[in-house]
Structure formats: structure tokens, C-alpha cells
Image: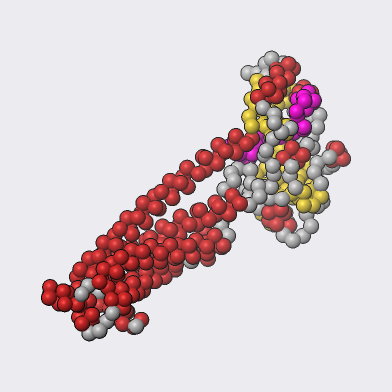
Amino acid sequence: MLRHLFTLIWNRKRANLLLISEIFFSFVVLFGLGTVLITAGKNFLTPRGFESAQVWRLLVRAGQGQKMPRAELDDVLRQVKALPGVQTVALTSNNLPFTFNTNNSDFVYKGRKTPFANTYDADDHYAEVLRLHLREGRWFAPADDGTHHRPVVITENMRQYLFGDEPALGKIFRYPMVVKNTKPEHEFQVVGVVDNVRMTTEFDEAIPSVWMRLLPYDTTHWETAAVLVRVAPGQGGALQEKIARTVAGVTRQWSTEVRVMEDDRLHRRRYTLVPVVGLGLMGLFLIINVALGLFGVLWYNISQRRAEIGLRRAMGATGAGIGWQFLGEMMVVTTFGVLLGGLLAAQFPLLNAFDLPTQPYLLAIAAAACAVYAITALCAWQPSRLAARIHPAVALREE
């Protein structure tokens, strides 16, 4: 039977070549769309590595042409922390979670060089605010005040890049600069390792991250200070107003902005989903057009092959057999298109394209193949039923 189907397909190779081309491009589109959706869905279901609920971000800016002495800034943070409803406060850098500010760099350790990693400045209370989960070691503490090298905490994927399966605690890495005359502040000693975090969007892969300790009571003058505030459940606008008044009470030349981190998360989610939804709609529109085209081609093929159908029915072929013949031809043609598309798609995991793991590509190939077979089967089902209903006498009389 299969040999007979190949013979029928070869006899109509020009028409079937067009079908194979349509199926091939449909597979490629579905593969690309499936890779994006599977990767985004997998990342969305992966734990973020920190807790953003009940966390606010506070942005304090000095007056025009002025800077904030660290001593006054620390005094403001103590007053904010003392407010009822505030659980803890942490000073950090401006690249806060779910914002569009980024700060990254690469690092080296004994010839190993990392990809660009997110770098954050953080004080001793940062992990408590975001509830980071320590895998090894500890977070920053007053005991780090007298260390020669700058203490850092890294994520698990950062540890893999730098040290592989070796222990990370106590090891020192640096910026990729000339080794001679390297300043101590450009060398970093690992005091802790935390779970991987995804602080850009919920749909991105976890980026290697490094937190560098902010020295308490230093002499730095700040133009803008980013502060994370963990509040008790149920707090709202009244506490935000109290925080703004507390900061203004130190000096009226400072301005304050308080935002809820969950609002930032939802805003970033919508921003990320817009292109994904647009890509999905484009893919759906293309697939609908391909399906309509396949349906039309199959319908036309049946009208052109009525004499063949009538002759087969006159020689004893059943209506069900005719229907399965047309459906089988379509499945064989689909297999050719899927194989060509699969050969192209297989190059992506082999070449490690876009730095994605192999699993999303394999799942996307399987999903695209299943979708293409389902679409072509649905398109071929009704024309096959019509072919099965053709009466041999009617078909032969028309010829």
C-alpha cells in the first residue's frame, strides 16, 4: 500500500512539490513560534529566586546640583525603617528588579571568563528584603568591614561559570583587566552563593548575577539613592505618604518616589508579552492561510481525479478505502515536508543558536510536527470524505 502511495505521489510530483513547500514553511514557522512560547513558558514556571510581594522601591534624589552625604542618607533609612508597617530597608544600586536599568560586566578566574553578568550593589539587609535563598555561605555582615577584598555573593549559575563544581566560598575573582597593579576593590571574595534569580522579566532565563557589598558609613555622596522597602501585608497609600514625608523631613531639597514592585512586575510582563502575542497572531494568520490553501488544493485534486476514483470504485474499491487513500497520500506528502523542516530545525540545537538549551528546541520540533500533521489531517479529512462518496457510475459517465 505504501509503495502504491509513493507511486501516486511521484506521478503528481509537480502538484505535490507545492504542497511539500507549504508544509515545510508551515513547520518552520511553527517551530520558531513553539521555541519562543516553550522557552517563555518554561521560564515563567521556574521560581524567580526572590519574593517581590510586599516590597516597594524608593528612589531618593538630591536637589539640583547637590549630593546626599551618606551619613544623612543612613539617617533617613533608619527613620523610614522605624515607621509602623515597615519591616526592613535596604540600600542598593539603581538596577532594581523589573526595571529597565541594567548594570553588567564580565569576570575572570584562572583563565575562565564569564558571560556578561548582572552586578548589583547591596547592603547587609538586601537579602532580607528580597528573601534570597542561600545555598552556601552567608550574606554580608559587619564582620566584612575589615576585609581586604570586596565581599560578594553570587548566583549558582555564576558559580558554575567561574568555578565549575569546585567550592566557591573564599575564592577571589576579578575584572578582566591587567593582573599587575590590580586594586583590591577590583578583586572580589565570595562569601555566599544564592539560588538563580530572574530580575529582568518573568520570561527570561536566569542571568548570572553578582552582589557587591556597600560599605556602611562610607564618605560617598549620592546624587540618587535606590532603596528597597519590605512592608507588612495590607499596607498601601497611607504608608507611602508617610515615607515621602519622612524623607522630606530631613531636607526639603530631596525628592522621593515610591513604587510597588508588584506593579513594576506586571508592567514588565505586559511589555514582554506584546511582541510574543504579536508573533503568535502572525503565526496563527499564516497557518490559517496555509490550511485554507491545502484544503483548496485537495478539493481541486479530487475534482481532477474523479475518473480515477470512479475506475477504482468500479474495480471493487470501497468508499472507505478511497478516503484512506487520499488521507494516506496527504500524510506521506506531509512527512516529506516535516523531514525537510526537521533537518533545518535540528541545526539550531547542534549550533547552540541563541544560547538556548537543547530541550526547548526538541520540544518545539515535536510540537511543530504534531501541529502540522493535525492541520493537514483536518484539511484532508473532508475532501477524503467527498472522494469516498463519489459513485462510480456517476464519475465514469462524466468522463
Pick the residue in front: 71 or 373: 373
261 is within the stretch colored magenta: no
Colouring scheme applied when the structure was drawn: secondary structure
Percent of width and height locating residue 281: 41, 48
Residue lying at the far top in this picture: please name it.
252
The residue range painted magenta reads 78-105
Residue at 41% across / 64% down in the picture? 374
Residue at 16% across / 74% down in the picture? 394
Decide: is 195 above or below 252: below
Pick the residue in front: 323 or 70: 323
94 is within the stretch colored magenta: yes
Residue at 81% across / 46% down in the picture? 138
28 on left or right of 205: left
The part of the image, by quadrant, that contains residue 69 is top right
Q: For the C terminus, which image quadrant? A: bottom left
345 on left or right of 234: left
Q: How many marks?
A: 0
337 on left or right of 96: left
Residue at 23% across / 69% down in the picture? 302
Decide: is 312 above or below 374: below
Decide: is 12 above or below 257: below
Percent of width and height locating residue 142: 85, 37
Q: Is residue 107 something that shows in the picture?
A: no
Pick the residue in front: 212 or 182: 212
Decide: is 313 above or below 37: below
Percent of width and height locating residue 388: 27, 73
Percent of width and height locating residue 1: 34, 83
